[in-house]
Amino acid sequence: MHTGVSHPAGGQGGRPLSTVRLHAGELTLSYDRRTVAEGLDVTIPDGSFTIIVGPNACGKSTLLRAMAGLLPPRRGTVYLDGAAISSYRTKEVARKLGLLPQSSIAPDGITVADLVARGRYPHQSLLRQWTAEDEFHVTTAMRATRVTDLSERPVDELSGGQRQRVWLAMALAQQTDLLLLDEPTTYLDIAHQIEMLDLCADLHGEGRTLVAVLHDLNHASRYASHLIAMRAGAIVAQGDPRDVVTEDLVREVFGLPCEVIADPQTGTPLVVPASRQARRLLETPVDATG
Ligand SMILES: Nc1ncnc2c1ncn2[C@@H]1O[C@H](COP(=O)(O)OP(=O)(O)O)[C@@H](O)[C@H]1O
Ligand SMILES: [Mg+2]
C-alpha cells in the first residue's frame, strides 16, 4: 500500500495525548457477552473531517457511541481534552461534543422548533434559562439545515430526509466544536446527500472537527480529510482518502472486486464495482475453463 497510510500498530497505549482533543486507546467494546472490538486505538485529528467507512455491523456506530461517552468501554479509555470522557458530567461532554445518532426517536408530537431547541439544553441551568443567545443558535441552526419552514410541524410527520435535517439542526444548535455524525446522509436522495455533505464541509471549514460514518466510498473520498476504514471491529487503514481507497483495500474490507479510477470532477478515488460478468470470471479458476 502507498505511503501515508498508517496501519494501526498500537503503541499509543492508554494515556491521554496532550495534543489531540479526541482519541481512544486500547478500547474493548462489547454488549453483554458480544465483543464488537478489541484493542482499538483511534485518533481523530483536530480540525479534520474524518469519515469512517466499513461494512454493515463492523462496529462503526458502536465506536461512535463510545467516542461520545455513551457506551462505556469494557477496557481502554476515550480521552476528551486530555481527560477520560467518563470523568466529565454529561452536560460538560455535551458542551464539547455533539452526536447525531444513526436512528433517533423524537418525543411524541414534538415540533421541529422544540426539538431543535433541545440542543440548547446542555447550556442551560436553574440559573441560566432560555436566552436570546439560545434563540439565535436555534434560528441559525434551522436556517443552515433548511428546516425553518418546517418549524411548527410535528417531527413524526416528516419525511426521513426532513427528519435527518432536523436532528442535524439540533446537533448544530448545541454549538460544539466536535461533531459526530452517524450516517447523516441515509434516507437522502443524491442531491440532498451532496447538500448535507457540503454543509458538513462548511462546518469543517469554519474550524469544527467532524467525524461522520458514511456508506458511499466516493462521497467519503471527496469530502474526508482523514478516512478510517474499519472491518470486524478493527481499523484496517487510515489516512488521506487518495492513499486509503485502493482496489486492494475495497476488496479486503468489503470483499468487492472493483476498479478505482480518478473522479473526473475532483481527482479523488472513484470506486467502480467490477461487473457481474467480470466477477464471475474472477471466481473461475483459470485451469478449469478449458
Ligand atoms: N444494542 C446492542 N446490543 C447488542 N448488540 C448490538 C447492539 N448494537 C449493535 N450490536 C451489535 O454490534 C455489532 C456492531 O454494530 P454496529 O456498531 O451498529 O455496526 P455498524 O454501525 O458498523 O453497522 C453488530 O454485530 C451488532 O449486531
Ligand atoms: Mg451503524
Image (tube, grey):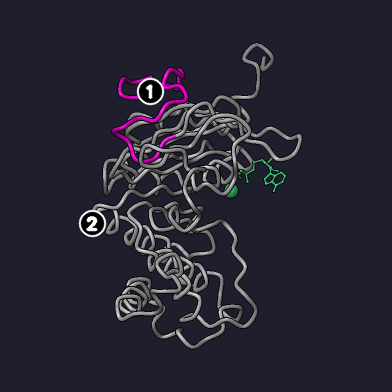
Report the amino acid beneath label 2.
Glu
Q: Residue at x 73, y 35 (%)?
A: 34
Report the amino acid beneath label 1.
Ser
Cα separation, mark 2 vs mark 1, equals 27 Å
- Where disc 1 sits, the SS reads loop
Q: Callout 1: 10 Å neighbours few (<14), some, many (20+)?
A: some
Q: Which residue is mark 2?
A: 206
Residue 29 lies, in percent from the top left, at 62, 35
Q: Residue at x 32, y 54 (%)?
A: 177
Residue 76 lies, in percent from the top left, at 54, 29
Nearer-N-terminus badge (2/1): 1
Tell me if 63 is positioned left or right of 36 in this view: left
Q: Evaluate whether residue 204 shows in this view.
A: yes
Point out the stretch of residues depicted in magenta: 1-23
Tell me if 282 is positioned left or right of 1 in this view: right
Q: Which residue is mark 1?
A: 6
The quarter in which the N terminus is drawn is: top left
Residue reaching furthest to the left:
206
